[in-house]
């Protein structure tokens, strides 16, 4: 089934792209959430108008993403975790923890935007990448300390 994407979807495409997906995925996920529209003949004819409006929307979101990335570069998060002998941490700092820490500072970041290969399990300082928009990323400093 062919659809026209109205939002960027990871591993599928960007706004305005005409892509082929399985009918169930389109019918049960993409269309009800208004992430895409069916690629009918009328929609395919109107695709240039749709792409123009999506390009304007993307440009404004890109500007906002660059501003948010600049603000995120100066952010530092601090977490305290219990440790055992030899500074072995109980638990870890996950993407959800980082997203909550950023939300507490006023940033609207989803945990899926935090790019962390695996949870932080060491005491100390780490650099974490936040994917703000398509190709816009920001680095934040995350410090994990021992709980006294």
Image: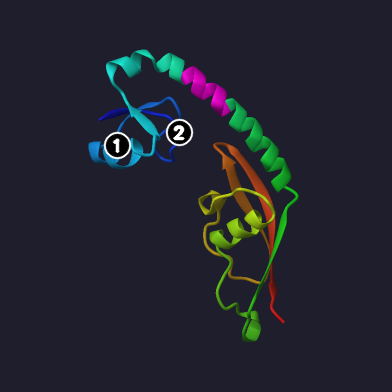
Q: Which mark is residue 130?
A: none
For the residues labelled 2 and 1, say whether their Cβ atoms are less than 8 Å apart. Answer: no
The residues bearing labels 2 and 1 have C-alpha atoms spaced at a distance of 13 Å
Depicted 58 relative to depicted 110: above or below: above
Image quadrant where residue 39 sits? top left
Which of 124 and 23 lies nearest the eye of the viewer? 23
Quadrant housing the C terminus: bottom right
Identity of the residue drawn at 25% across and 37% down: 22
- Residue at the disc numbered 1: 26
Horizontal placement of 134 versus 77: left or right?
A: left
Residue 127: in magenta span:
no
- Residue at the disc numbered 2: 7
Colouring style:
rainbow
Q: Position of residue 127 (x, y in %)?
A: 66, 56
Query: What segment carries the magenta color?
Result: 51-58
Instruction: Name the residue at the right extreme.
Output: 74
Quadrant housing the N terminus: top left
Label located before the other in sequence (2 or 1): 2
Which of 35 and 92 lies nearest the eye of the viewer? 35
Q: Position of residue 95 (x, y in %)?
A: 55, 59
Chief secondary structure of the magenta portion: helix
Depicted 33 relative to depicted 45: above or below: below
Horizontal placement of 88 versus 13: left or right?
A: right
Query: How many other residues sit within 10 Å of disc 1, few (<14), some (14-19) or many (≥20)?
Result: many
Depicted 48 relative to depicted 99: above or below: above
Identity of the residue drawn at 61% across and 80% down: 88
Identity of the residue drawn at 46% across and 20% down: 51
Q: Position of residue 43 (x, y in %)?
A: 34, 18
Which of 55 and 139 lies nearest the eye of the viewer? 55
Residue at disc 1, secondary structure:
helix
């Amino acid at each position: 089934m062919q659809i026209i994407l109205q939002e960027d979807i990871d591993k599928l495409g960007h706004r305005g792209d005409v892509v082929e997906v399985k009918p169930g995925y389109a019918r049960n996920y993409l269309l009800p959430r208004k992430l895409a529209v069916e690629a009918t003949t009328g929609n395919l004819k109107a695709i240039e108008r749709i792409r123009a409006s999506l390009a304007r929307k993307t440009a404004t979101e890109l500007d906002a993403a660059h501003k948010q990335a600049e603000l995120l570069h100066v952010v530092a998060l601090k977490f305290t975790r219990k440790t055992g002998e030899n500074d072995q941490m109980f638990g870890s700092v996950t993407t959800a923890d980082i997203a909550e820490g950023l939300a507490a500072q006023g940033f609207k970041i989803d945990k899926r935007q935090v790019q962390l290969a695996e949870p932080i399990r060491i005491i100390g300082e780490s650099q974490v990448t936040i994917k703000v928009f398509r190709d816009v990323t920001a680095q934040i400093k995350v410090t994990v300390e021992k709980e006294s």
